[in-house]
Structure formats: structure tokens, C-alpha cells
Image: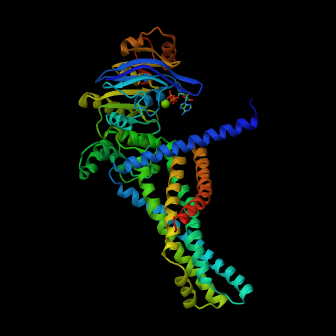
């Protein structure tokens, strides 16, 4: 029986399966060429700069204010409950290191750097520059994808560590200025109740996010069709898909890490 | 030698190439002419598998790349080809120097210190100088095309595929490009396939001319015989191109 709705669902399902298969093949080829090609030092450094350095300001601002608002809200709740702002440092650092640092940074990077990657590769695709790579003795995987994967895998975890620090600092400032919690107490709360595994929990997740963002952005770029309009469409799709997947992956990887005791 | 057997290519429902059979001999200059949108670019893209044909064999020196999905085989075969893209396809993020030297880096063992000299030589062949440090966005359309030509021939491949080498160029540079194509063949024994609208160019340079029409090669012959062709498509194309049965009209050259 053909029905517009079932047909639509069916078609969406087929295209999703196709994308997943295509992305898997692309990933396979990245792994294949990673071990077999000359290291593209120049291109890799360039990508680290685009992906990492250019996202730094936005990441810093985001996490700074997140740290501040966390401290503010926690402090207020604690005051209401216990008449005293207790454990602010613990709670700010806990939320930031385990969840908000990695997740917010990944979302910023997906929106900032992921979009750049998709738009650049997409433009190369529609102007036949991707084809040109094949005719000049290399291929898009070696020349474009491998350096971008490396850059995402180096820069996203680094940015997250920065974001953690900056967010904790933001919380500290609000604690001192608005809640009257001295910085010594704030940091004491952090170091007493948090250990390395809490940091690792968030840090490990960023590698999964980096893989995912690189895969989505590169795949969408390489499969761009239809001129400048197509590039715009591919870029938007890549950003939306990456952002949603950050949230989805976050739950499952957290569950996995909790299960193994991190 | 490139042997093409029963090549079929379609985009969706639209069949562009229908059962093409032709062989391109070593050392020859094979031109493909035909009206716009008929499938000339599609044809040469199939030759190095930038497009995957629906069916058929493409034997490059005996290796069939028509349907293989082995990346190594494809990469190996593609190394013996140079390809001039219709729209140039220069890398936007690289300078002219880096663009032209690109193939040298991946296809040859030429030491890096020689790149500037070779690039300068190749650019001179297409009538350009002092543009090495410019980005493609700073070039005119015709300049881009010529830089792209320099890039595609820089590594001196065994086969050259030119997609519209002279479109958009002025008469002087057109002459230079013609000389370049002829020299590449004469001095380096490069086998060439030239796709063009320009019938006079095809008749002047080629060892054989093929007319693509309705998905098939309706005529494949030496320039002299091609002029005499009785095929309706060929006749129409010649009339539109303003060439008489006896040879190129001097006015339109
Ligand atoms: N990627 C594609 N998807 C769908 N149709 C395509 C695609 N590329 C080309 N076509 C169609 O195939 C036909 C042949 O295109 P092709 O580019 O080979 O023509 P051409 O002979 O090179 O024309 P021109 O001389 O204008 O360059 C055209 O009708 C075009 O609409
Ligand atoms: Mg064309």
C-alpha cells in the first residue's frame, strides 16, 4: 500500500541509511589513508588554527558566563536551603568538568569550525576542486579529511580544558563578589570533592565529539550538490546534525563511562 | 592506448552516452566536438572515472577502470593523466605557484627547490608571468584557465585530457594554447584528447576528430575526411561553424 506518509517515512529512512553507510565508508578511507600518506604538516597546522584558535574566543566567553551563572544559581539555592552558600566550587566544577565544558565547547566548535569545514569542502566539491585533487596525484581523503580529523582531535579536547578552567574562574569571581565565598574556600571545595576521574569523564567524551563533528562536517561537505545554494544547505544541515548528535552522544557515552566507573 | 567499449552513462533517466566504442591510440590527438550540453565533458570525465559509467569498459593500457572500485588501481591509472577542467578548478586557498606546483609534489620526484623555476616555465608557455604570488580570486577567467592548463601539464603526464582549452581566450593566447597542445604532443609524445566547440581548432590540430551527437559518436575520422562527411549532424555543425566543405573559412579563424 502506497501512502504519502509511509512513503515519506520510508524515503527518509532510506536516505538516513545511505548517509550512515556513506559516512562509515568515508571514515574507513580516512583510517586507511591516515597510515599511508605523507603527513600534510602545513594543511594540518592551518586547520588547527581555523578549528581551534578561531573558536577560542567564543568558547572562552561561553564557558566564562556559564561558570558565572552556575555559581549564581547554586549559591542562591544553597542560601534558600541552608542559609549559606555552601559547596559552590564543588558544584560549579562538577557540572563544568563532567558536562557543560565538553558539551558547550563541542556545540561552539560544531557551529563555528564545523560550518567552516563543510562550507570549504562543499565549495571545493561544486567547483570541481575535489575532482582536481584526483587528477593531481592525491585524493580528498589524504589532502583534506585526514588533516581536519587530526585538527579536530587535537583542538577540541584542548579547548575543553581551557573552557573548564575559564568556567571555574568565572564561578570563583561570582562566588567572591556576589556570594561572599572566599576563593580559598571555593577551591578547597573543588579539590576536596573532585578527583581526576571527574575530569577524565568529561575529557574522554570530547574525543568522541571530535570524531563525530569531523565526520559529519566532512561528509556533508563531500556530498554537497547544486552550486552555492547547495553549499548553504549542506552547511546548515551539518551544524544542526552535529549539535543534535552532541546531545545524543553525550547521554550514551556518559552512561558508558559511568558503567566502567569513570 | 585507451580502449572504450560499450560505454553507457546516464544521469537519472537521461541517457547521455549510449554504447560508445572507440579507441584512442598512443601519440594521437583525438578531438571530441559537439554542441553544448551533449555530453563531451561527461565523456572525458568517464575516461578517468571522475564519473562512474553505468556499464562498459575503459581500458587504459590494458587496465579496466570502468567498474573497478579499487582505490589503488584508480589512483595508479589516474597518475598517468593530466586533466584540464572546463571551469579551471584551481584551488582557491593556494597561490598560483602552489597550484601549478601541486602535481609536481604528488606525481614527481622533482626537488622542492626546482618548483619556482618549473612553474615559471609552464606559466610562460601559456603567456603568463609574475602571477605566481596571486590567489585565483585575483585572476580573470581567461587567466584562471591558463593557470589551470599550466597546472595540468606541469607533471608531463602520459595522457592529457583538455576540456575546452581555448574557450574564453583572446586570439593571441588561443594561438599560444594551440602551440602548447601541439608541442606537448610533438616533443613529449603525449596522447591527447581535446574537447571543444571550436571546429576549426579541432580540424587544424587533430589526428582524428569525433563528433558526439545524441549520445553516440556519429563520425570519427581524420580531419580531411571529416570535412567531407555526409552525416547530417556533422553537416549542420559545420554550417553553423561557418566552415565550407573544402576547408576552414579564413575569416572565422
Ligand atoms: N551531475 C549531473 N547531474 C545531472 N545531469 C548532469 C550532470 N552533469 C551533466 N549533466 C547533464 O548531462 C548533459 C551533458 O553535460 P556535459 O557537461 O557533458 O555537456 P558538454 O557537452 O560538456 O557541454 P558544454 O559544451 O556546454 O560544456 C547535460 O545535458 C547536463 O544537463
Ligand atoms: Mg563541457
Q: Position of residue B115 (x, y in %)?
A: 27, 49
Disc tally is 0
Q: Is residue A15 above or below residue A251?
A: above
Residue A225 appears in view: no
Which one is in front, B224 or A78? A78
B128 over A99 or under it: above or below: above
Query: On the image, which quarter does residue A247 sit in?
Result: bottom right
In the current view of this chain or complex, which residue is farthest to the top? B230
Horizontally, residue A73 falls left or right of residue B239, namely right
Which residue is painted at 46% across and 48% down in the image?
Answer: A27
For residue A80, above or below residue A158? below
The answer to whether residue A182 is left or right of residue B164 is right
Dividing the picture into quarters, in which one does residue A42 lie?
A: bottom left
Asked whether the viewer can see residue A30, the reply is yes
Q: How is the image coloured?
A: rainbow
Q: Position of residue B127 (x, y in %)?
A: 34, 41
**What residue appears at the point 70 percent right and 40 percent down from the top-left corner?**
A9
Query: Is A53 placed above or below A133 here?
Result: below
Q: At 52% from the left edge and 68% from the top edge, which residue is drawn?
A: A261
- Residue A228, horizontal then vertical, whole percent: 58, 45
**Residue B6 in the image: x percent, y percent?**
44, 18
Q: Is residue B206 left or right of residue A213?
A: left
Image quadrant holding the N terminus of chain A, namely top right
Q: Nearer the viewer, residue B47 or A186?
A: A186
Along the line of sight, the residue nearer the viewer: A11 or A61: A11
Amino acid at each position: 500500500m502506497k501512502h504519502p506518509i509511509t512513503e515519506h517515512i520510508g524515503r527518509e529512512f532510506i536516505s538516513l541509511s545511505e548517509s550512515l553507510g556513506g559516512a562509515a565508508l568515508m571514515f574507513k578511507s580516512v583510517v586507511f589513508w591516515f597510515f599511508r600518506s605523507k603527513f600534510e604538516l602545513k594543511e594540518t597546522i592551518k586547520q588547527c588554527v581555523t578549528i581551534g584558535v578561531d573558536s577560542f574566543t567564543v568558547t572562552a566567553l561561553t564557558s566564562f558566563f556559564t561558570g558565572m551563572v552556575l555559581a549564581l544559581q547554586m549559591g542562591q539555592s544553597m542560601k534558600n536551603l541552608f542559609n549559606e552558600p555552601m559547596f559552590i566550587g564543588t558544584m560549579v566544577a562538577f557540572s563544568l568538568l563532567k558536562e557543560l565544558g565538553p558539551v558547550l565547547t563541542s556545540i561552539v566548535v560544531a557551529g563555528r569550525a564545523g560550518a567552516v569545514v563543510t562550507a570549504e569542502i562543499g565549495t571545493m566539491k561544486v567547483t570541481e576542486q575535489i575532482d582536481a585533487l584526483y587528477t593531481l596525484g592525491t585524493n580528498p581523503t589524504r589532502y583534506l579529511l585526514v588533516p581536519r580529523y587530526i585538527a579536530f582531535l587535537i583542538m577540541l579536547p584542548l579547548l575543553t580544558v581551557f573552557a573548564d578552567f575559564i568556567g571555574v574562574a568565572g564561578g570563583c569571581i561570582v562566588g567572591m563578589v556576589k556570594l561572599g565565598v572566599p576563593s580559598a574556600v571555593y577551591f578547597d571545595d573543588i579539590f576536596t570533592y573532585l578527583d581526576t576521574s571527574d575530569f577524565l569523564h568529561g575529557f574522554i567524551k570530547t574525543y568522541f565529539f571530535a570524531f563525530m563533528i569531523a565526520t559529519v562536517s566532512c561528509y556533508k561537505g563531500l556530498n554537497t550538490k547544486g552550486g552555492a545554494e547547495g553549499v548553504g544547505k549542506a552547511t546548515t544541515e551539518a551544524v544542526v546534525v552535529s549539535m543534535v548528535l552532541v546531545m545524543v552522544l553525550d547521554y550514551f557515552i556518559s552512561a558508558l563511562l559511568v558503567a566502567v566507573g569513570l | 592506448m585507451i580502449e572504450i567499449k560499450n560505454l553507457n552513462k546516464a544521469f537519472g533517466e537521461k541517457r547521455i552516452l549510449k554504447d560508445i566504442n572507440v579507441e584512442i591510440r598512443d601519440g594521437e590527438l583525438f578531438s571530441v566536438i559537439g554542441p553544448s550540453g551533449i555530453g563531451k565533458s561527461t565523456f572525458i570525465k568517464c575516461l578517468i572515472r571522475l564519473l562512474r559509467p553505468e556499464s562498459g569498459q575503459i581500458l587504459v593500457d590494458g587496465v579496466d577502470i570502468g567498474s573497478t572500485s579499487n582505490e589503488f588501481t584508480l589512483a595508479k591509472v589516474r597518475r598517468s593523466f593530466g586533466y584540464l577542467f572546463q571551469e579551471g578548478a584551481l584551488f582557491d586557498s593556494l597561490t598560483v605557484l602552489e597550484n601549478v606546483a601541486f602535481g609536481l609534489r604528488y606525481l614527481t620526484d622533482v626537488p622542492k627547490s626546482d618548483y619556482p623555476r618549473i612553474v615559471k616555465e609552464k606559466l610562460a608557455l601559456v603567456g603568463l608571468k609574475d602571477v605566481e604570488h596571486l590567489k585565483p580570486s585575483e585572476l580573470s577567467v581567461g587567466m584562471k584557465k591558463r593557470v589551470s592548463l599550466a597546472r595540468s601539464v606541469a607533471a608531463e603526464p602520459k595522457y592529457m585530457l583538455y576540456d575546452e582549452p581555448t574557450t574564453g581566450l583572446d586570439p593571441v593566447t588561443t594561438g599560444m594554447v594551440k602551440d602548447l597542445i601541439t608541442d606537448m604532443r610533438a616533443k613529449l609524445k603525449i596522447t591527447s584528447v581535446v574537447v571543444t566547440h571550436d571546429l576549426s581548432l579541432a580540424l587544424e590540430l587533430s589526428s582524428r576528430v569525433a563528433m558526439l551527437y545524441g549520445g553516440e559518436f556519429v563520425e570519427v575520422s581524420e580531419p580531411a575526411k571529416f570535412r567531407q562527411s555526409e552525416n547530417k549532424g556533422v553537416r549542420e555543425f559545420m554550417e553553423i561553424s561557418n566552415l565550407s566543405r573544402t576547408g576552414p573559412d579564413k575569416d572565422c579563424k
